[in-house]
Image (cartoon, rainbow, N blue to C red):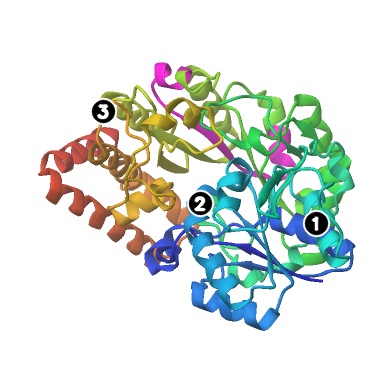
């Protein structure tokens, strides 16, 4: 059969020039895993990454006409559901014979609603590889799907929810993702990772053994499972030799998972000589790391570490169930700076209980840590998170699903925030986000550091600086001159 897998945009503004310049596309690993399993069954698979390929909905429909697939599968996250609804309606009107499957987080949580609206024929709940393969096989052979676990579907006027599917126990039983299904000309750069070349996502585990209230991955991966370290190294070696891509980004909740695993991974990379050929990037927790182990990780090719520092206010941090301490983060960053490893820090503004003062704590904390890259997101209570379950009755009734991204809100300046903490306003949160971005990046030493890294050319730095000034000017017009005075004062004190 012909199968088309689509990574959709949330709305067509995502194709605008400024958004594309600010947000580099990430190769859709989940679709490539599903594609690999379907290819094992000898189906003909296509992947369209609508955002990366800069495709409007009209262009996407034309591609569907060219491919003529039997089945279309959408990766369905919350911000994208409205556009998927639009595309589904258009596809059904032109190609009523095509079966439409939705998977990923939003589809898993809202299977009944999606089916009731006839957006999809079948929903895949949870991990998608095996269920999707069984669906395609059944459709191909015109067989009944009532015994396929982990799916929901509409049949004879009724919605059916089949028994849940258990998580894939042996992750190494899956084939490597079919990266050849993507056009790598669209994934050439990752400025936020300090790269001027492509990077391949890789997973050494699924799930997480922690339970931060803003995270929803437990809805997809109900248990924490690790791959064999040797198999992970095999995959890195295979992709490097086949595709000549030398950057590998771990998408685990954190990796390495233990000191022992770190030792095995580093020794394996070095013993095969891969440390001379590749760089690897990972996310770690900030609650402690051995200096000797960090040194070994750097010797094996570790280039950048990402940290979810989240907040510079301990009370807010505790409310997230993050189970980290601010002083631990400061100590960990000191160790990393000694090894001269690049860092990317993620920070969140707008948790329940947040105030303007606690937001300022986070901004000051970010500059004290002094990561090479930093990102400030407004807290979004995504469906599937504990945060959503606790505060869903306080979700802004004027908010649509396409509003579920703080980046869209900040760039457009007119999005409705799904959630606003008591005592705060949408305007105040946007001000704090702008304050964080501006006061962090418009500092001489950060600009010099980026120039040394050479990940952005002069034109891009001018564009980024102009964009920040433009957004600040917009906020100034609305809120007066006090904000810019505060920014200038904070920046001057910092440098």
Give the residue number, with chain letter if any, for mark 1. 135
Distance Cα–Cα, label 2 vs label 1: 38 Å
The reply to whether callout 2 and callout 3 are in contact (CB within 8 Å) is: no
The N terminus: image quadrant: bottom right
Q: Is residue 290 visible?
A: yes
Q: Position of residue 25 (x, y in %)?
A: 55, 60
Q: Dot 2, how many residues are within 10 Å of its Cα: few (below 14), some (14-19), or many (20+)?
A: some
Distance Cα–Cα, label 1 vs label 3: 50 Å
Mark 2 secondary-structure assignment: helix
Q: Is residue 193 above or below residue 97?
A: above
Which-is-in-front pick, marks 1 and 3?
1
Specify the quadrant of the image occupied by residue 428. Answer: top left
- Extreme-left residue of the structure: 480
Residue toward you, 171 or 165: 165
Give the residue number, with chain letter if any, for mark 3. 356
Q: Is residue 379 magenta?
A: no
Q: Position of residue 99 (x, y in %)?
A: 70, 65
385 vs 174, left or right, is: left
Q: Is residue 244 visible?
A: no
């Amino acid at each position: 059969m012909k199968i088309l897998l689509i990574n959709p945009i949330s709305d067509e503004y995502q194709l605008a020039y400024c958004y594309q310049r600010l947000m580099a596309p990430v190769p859709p690993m989940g679709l490539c895993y599903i594609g690999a399993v379907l290819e094992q069954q000898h189906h003909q698979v296509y992947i369209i990454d609508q955002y990366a390929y800069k495709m409007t909905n009209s262009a996407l429909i034309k591609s569907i006409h060219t491919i003529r697939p039997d089945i279309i599968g959408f990766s369905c996250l919350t911000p994208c559901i409205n556009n998927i609804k639009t595309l589904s309606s258009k596809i059904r009107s032109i190609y009523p014979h095509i079966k439409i499957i939705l998977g990923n987080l939003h589809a898993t949580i809202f299977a009944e609603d999606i089916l009731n609206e006839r957006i999809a024929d079948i929903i895949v709940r949870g991990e998608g590889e095996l269920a999707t393969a069984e669906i395609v096989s059944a459709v191909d052979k015109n067989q009944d799907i009532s015994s396929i676990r982990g799916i929901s579907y509409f049949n004879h006027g009724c919605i059916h929810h089949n028994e849940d599917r258990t998580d894939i126990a042996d992750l190494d039983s899956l084939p490597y993702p079919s990266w050849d299904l993507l056009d790598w000309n669209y994934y050439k750069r990752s400025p936020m990772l300090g790269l001027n070349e492509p990077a391949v996502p890789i997973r050494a585990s699924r799930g997480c053994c922690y339970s931060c209230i803003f995270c929803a991955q437990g809805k997809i991966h109900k248990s924490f499972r690790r791959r064999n370290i040797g198999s992970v190294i095999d995959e890195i070696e295979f992709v490097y030799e086949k595709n000549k891509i030398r950057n590998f980004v771990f998408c685990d909740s954190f990796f390495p998972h233990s000191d022992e695993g770190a030792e095995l991974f580093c020794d394996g990379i070095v013993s095969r000589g891969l440390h001379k050929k590749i760089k690897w990037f990972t996310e770690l927790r900030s609650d402690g790391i051995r200096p000797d182990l960090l040194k070994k990780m750097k010797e094996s090719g570790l280039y950048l570490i990402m940290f979810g520092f989240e907040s510079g206010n301990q009370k807010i941090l505790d409310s997230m169930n993050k189970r980290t301490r601010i002083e631990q983060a400061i100590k960990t960053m000191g160790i990393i700076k000694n090894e001269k490893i690049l860092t990317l820090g993620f920070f969140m503004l707008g948790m329940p209980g947040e105030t303007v003062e606690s937001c300022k704590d986070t901004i000051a904390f970010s500059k004290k840590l002094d990561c090479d890259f930093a990102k400030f997101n407004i807290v979004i209570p995504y469906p599937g998170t504990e945060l959503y379950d606790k505060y869903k009755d306080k979700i802004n009734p004027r908010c649509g699903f396409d509003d579920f991204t703080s980046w869209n809100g900040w760039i457009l300046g007119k999005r409705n925030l799904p959630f606003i903490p008591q005592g705060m306003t949408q305007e105040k949160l946007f001000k704090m986000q702008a304050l964080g971005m501006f006061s962090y990046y418009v500092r001489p030493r950060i600009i010099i550091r980026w120039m040394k890294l050479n990940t952005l050319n002069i034109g891009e730095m001018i564009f980024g600086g102009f964009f920040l000034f433009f957004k600040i000017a917009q906020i100034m017009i609305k809120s007066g001159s006090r904000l810019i005075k505060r920014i200038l004062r904070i920046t001057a004190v910092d440098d």
